[in-house]
Amino acid sequence: MPLHPDRLFPAEPAKRDIARLLYGHVRDLPIVSPHGHTDPTWYAEDMPFPDPATLFVKPDHYIFRMLYSQGIALEALGVPRPDGTPVETDGRKIWRLFADNYHLFRGTPSRLWFEHSLETVFGIGERLGADNADRLYDRISEQLADPSMRPRALYERFNIEAISTTDAATDALAAHEAILASGWKGRVVPAYRPDAVVDASRTGFHTAVEELLGLAETPATFAGYLEAHRRRRTYFKARGATSTDHGHPTALTANLSQADAAALFDRVMKPEVDARDAELFRAQMLTEMARMSIEDGLVMQIHPGSFRNHNPQLFETFGFDKGADIPTRTDYVRDLKPLLDLFGNDPRLTLILFTLDETTYGRELAPLAGHYPALRLGPAWWFFDSPDGMRRFRELTTETAGFYNTVGFNDDTRAFCSIPARHDMARRIDCAYLAELVSDHRLEEDEAYEVAHDLAYNLAKKAYRL
Amino acid sequence: MPLHPDRLFPAEPAKRDIARLLYGHVRDLPIVSPHGHTDPTWYAEDMPFPDPATLFVKPDHYIFRMLYSQGIALEALGVPRPDGTPVETDGRKIWRLFADNYHLFRGTPSRLWFEHSLETVFGIGERLGADNADRLYDRISEQLADPSMRPRALYERFNIEAISTTDAATDALAAHEAILASGWKGRVVPAYRPDAVVDASRTGFHTAVEELLGLAETPATFAGYLEAHRRRRTYFKARGATSTDHGHPTALTANLSQADAAALFDRVMKPEVDARDAELFRAQMLTEMARMSIEDGLVMQIHPGSFRNHNPQLFETFGFDKGADIPTRTDYVRDLKPLLDLFGNDPRLTLILFTLDETTYGRELAPLAGHYPALRLGPAWWFFDSPDGMRRFRELTTETAGFYNTVGFNDDTRAFCSIPARHDMARRIDCAYLAELVSDHRLEEDEAYEVAHDLAYNLAKKAYRL
Amino acid sequence: MPLHPDRLFPAEPAKRDIARLLYGHVRDLPIVSPHGHTDPTWYAEDMPFPDPATLFVKPDHYIFRMLYSQGIALEALGVPRPDGTPVETDGRKIWRLFADNYHLFRGTPSRLWFEHSLETVFGIGERLGADNADRLYDRISEQLADPSMRPRALYERFNIEAISTTDAATDALAAHEAILASGWKGRVVPAYRPDAVVDASRTGFHTAVEELLGLAETPATFAGYLEAHRRRRTYFKARGATSTDHGHPTALTANLSQADAAALFDRVMKPEVDARDAELFRAQMLTEMARMSIEDGLVMQIHPGSFRNHNPQLFETFGFDKGADIPTRTDYVRDLKPLLDLFGNDPRLTLILFTLDETTYGRELAPLAGHYPALRLGPAWWFFDSPDGMRRFRELTTETAGFYNTVGFNDDTRAFCSIPARHDMARRIDCAYLAELVSDHRLEEDEAYEVAHDLAYNLAKKAYRL
């Protein structure tokens, strides 16, 4: 299906006309991508992407979770097994399986992102299906070999102005250093993601903390541990980082005395960790991270509410990030209070909140962000990074928090080719929402142009200090 | 108000045109009704329905709850009292009371179902009111006497292909046997609803379990009790059943060892049952039922989240199902985990989930159904089986779970004449939703036809193995 | 931006035409304002309002919370500090700060209310901004000096038929008495708000109860305390009150024996109050208030779910009502049960429920109000008293509770000039919703006129017995 120029715009002609005009002014703005999961080695090494299945199916949990939900084995989709059991390696077979089940994606954003990539990156304006699967496979394969399809060329073609990766606190950032050293003009910055050294309930926590302390050359005390964070944050900042990111099961924060926090640290550093201690330590560390952000200026992001690895059979066989992460209810009002009591009024802090619980948009997040100077709202996230999800985000937050307590768009993706597709979708939905406000006379057209530009470009740059 | 051919379609002309075309292709498809509460003796005995009040008012808790909420006594509406206190028996008086208060139903689906029935079954295209109440009463009464208004004739006229009733585990299914023996071509199948022998907090639980064990001729041990379920399920299956149904206060499941489960069974079989034991036993039995479904192929349905009989005065006077059942919050992510840990990846199981808590559509149900091969989503249920409710169901589930993790429509009704009205409403709303996707270029028109057909017919047949 | 005659109407021409027609029939109906926070001394003394900043910025927490969220100090906005620290007193400077940041209000209802006031009260059809701030300040200031801008003149010009204030249980109602004595034809009635003498967790509770007992001349026993409420309610009723109002953190109610309640009263009257005792006492007192309402006919309102004074720094500096009240989840189904078990079926009681948790509209409030004769639903409240908020209220309640279990509009404001703006917004949104129902043939046009009139005028008068 060739991309329709009016896709995602309102059908009502007067509204559609306004949406078109607004979109025309933001369509070609550079992409600022302040939160995502692309691999920095792509930009460092600039090697070609392999076959179509490896590009579109194997790494995309949106794609394979849907196929899996209808009984298709992950092995048949080439998803690797950590234990080394062989899985399908024939990209063409995987691609055919995807093509045969393409109808499952009707009505999903995955479908729209995929088709946007197909057409804008590969010039393919056809709908994938059993009948053309092989032909399209060959056509994409052929193009992938071309130098114009390498990561740096695509970065430039996608008109990316800056992109952030997400990196473990203990990461040496070798790829980022290589990019900086290469003289290439692309801006690829790291983000400090310390979950592995903060969440004592995770396998590998103690090893990760030891590694952190070793890198920072600090002692295994709470003071040494905090100092290690400070040094690693400085290390990240020197390599371009402007933000930190925290993916926690809940939004719980704590405000322990430093003595109690130190005692808690000693407890979670023992081999057996109590689940409540682990939760409290995560909570305290969000507060510590906010304190450090006030010192060093890194923007702080909290992504709470995912029940990770809900499916134990799948987790044992395939490991993390295999589509079995399920949203849960989140309580921001009580959970964030300890942190906000300390730092909520401090304009030096920018704390960006995300949610997987849409019921909190209107009830909790917009009222909080519409009051506390330190708070901003991240865009619709993960399952809700979709046309209807983004529309609900605006409808449920704008009336209380306005536009200027939000921070533009995050593509949040590891699917490189989908980056322009996702930003384009966000721009279209925001323009459609603004067209709605203009057409029912809640906003004047000249203001809508300004807001559209802010949502597509300025707000992300400003909030993330890029 | 004569039924408008464009009712429930979008007003915007381009969208409306698409909706009309899509609907035109599914309007006349046979009705598959895989979950409902019609009385099998209707089809077995084929006796005429009595007067209009008995057809439309007395048995319909949607109707009398609304009248009751405005201060009209249930006695005046002819709702029977189990203690034998006389209630209004004059159908005409009841009908007049309904007609006098007909304005209360403005904006409700009850109004739309009622008017669809009036016009399509009785040829009455007028709005009910105080002025025409008597005339319409006479006209309907007269028609009810006609053989064309008997249950089997209506079944055929409604173009029903198959309909499921809901039957207690201990039901002898005499009516179903009579239907099968009669040679009538209608397909009326039972569904296995074991709540009364599973929920130890209910009055009559112990008697019901004794009856179950007696029917199955199994001992009063946990093993005997499970075997009794197996035998009764086989009995139901032999009489056409393809599904089981479980109406629980919560979605809690459990995975006890068989020894612990047996000890729990012994505890709940004692006269005094602890509320937590009753909850745990219900939870364990959902898991046992799933295990049996994998063995015998019966599709499993869970309908959780209703706080039954919230109004004790009303319950004491009138008993069950009198409109005082109120939805509550439900947590599927944690509650279903024990069952899903065991069987969520088993493609032999089809577990259909319903909800009365719409906040779970996007946050929990679509992500779960969009991952686990065993899960499917039932349609918008009870209070949400309405134009806006069905629209929200699609908007909140499709982007994550797609269409093919849903199972078409359930009319879920005991109001026989409303069956075509309800299916027609669902078809219209689904076509309106698809028209939306087509008009903003998220779906192509040829695909929308296919999806519309699947939603109206194929998905229910397939999911319920009918 | 001059007010557009079609603002807030659907853009689709056929729907818009219906909305226009419906609105034309209700636009000029008198305003019935059964719940609000205007100051009765305004009407008693009829003094001119001071400068524009004091009229529009300083007292409006919707306005200053948004400015504060973007780092503007409340001191700079002239919000007074109880400790006497000087704050900005130059109205013009405050006004300029508002004007410079006017873009923050894009997409918010505050913006719409403000512009409606500017144009309809002051004849200013321009958008406020840095360029015209001084000129508009002068123009408003000049007009405020005119007798036609005094409270009584504005009351008449706004076509208010009756307005309720909200008054502490211990208030002498001197202003109300003065209004009654003055012979002015305006109807300004008090509402009985006993929170300060019911919520034992509040600072000042004991002093307030002593004052209550002193005023009523009753002993410091539970019986004396209840009798004091009865006498104060009678006192309020004699001065025009038709309702009581209860702003509680939760919707919890209780049904203690009178002996247990008396013991609880004795405990909360001691200097140290246990938090659970305070919660239980509030709960019991809601039930007592309902009992008294059945006796004296005062309509009862419950406004639960606000986490008051979430920001301790701000609370310490500026006190109550400074924008740091955040909504929380509310459970009506379990919390209201003790009260409903006693009085839910009593048609003499009218209990109006409000919420800050929109998830309860469809799941809890509409099913409860669509069943219990004593219950009615208040309109969309506080953060949700907005175009999208009011639309969601109708979409999520009408299908289950209909229109006639709702009570029309409450402006709930202390911003006098915004009263017509708020009622106009509610009338427009209700007409837009009705136009939706008419255009997709769920309601006939003649019925929509009747409903529009009921929503704009009759329902409030009837529910509040005004």
Image: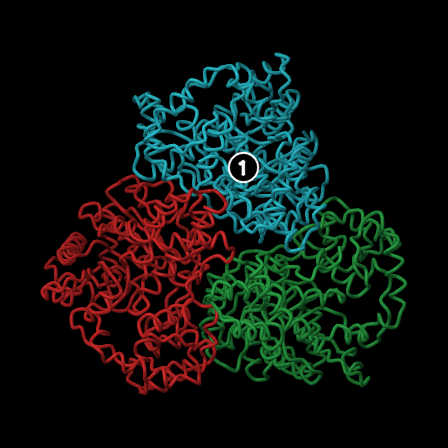
Chain colours: A red, B green, C cyan
Which x, y percent locates residue C451? 68, 43
Task: Report which residue position mark 1 lands on.
Answer: C282
Query: Observer-nearest residue: C194 or B395?
Result: B395
User: What residue type is disc 1 on?
Assistant: Arg
Residue B464 quadrant: bottom right
Query: Observer-nearest residue: A298 or B311?
Result: A298
Q: For label 1, count other residues whose C-alpha is less than 10 Å away and answer few (under 14), some (14-19) or many (20+).
A: many
Q: Is residue A352 left or right of residue B210?
A: left
Tell me which residue sits at (44%, 82%) in the image.
A100
When the figure is inspected, residue A21 is found, relative to residue B301, above or below; the finding is: above
When the figure is inspected, residue A208 is found, relative to residue C181, above or below; the finding is: below
Q: Chain of mark 1?
A: C
SS class, disc 1? helix
Which x, y percent locates residue A426? 37, 58
Query: Observer-nearest residue: C68 or A246?
Result: C68
Residue C13 appears in the picture as rendered: yes
Residue B15 quadrant: bottom right
Which x, y percent locates residue A70? 47, 78
Which x, y percent locates residue A115? 39, 71
Q: Quadrant of the C terminus of chain C?
A: top right
Q: Is residue A204 left or right of residue B73?
A: left
When the figure is inspected, residue C405 is found, relative to residue C87, above or below; the finding is: below
Residue B285 appears in the picture as rendered: no
Total numbered badges shown on the rendered structure? 1
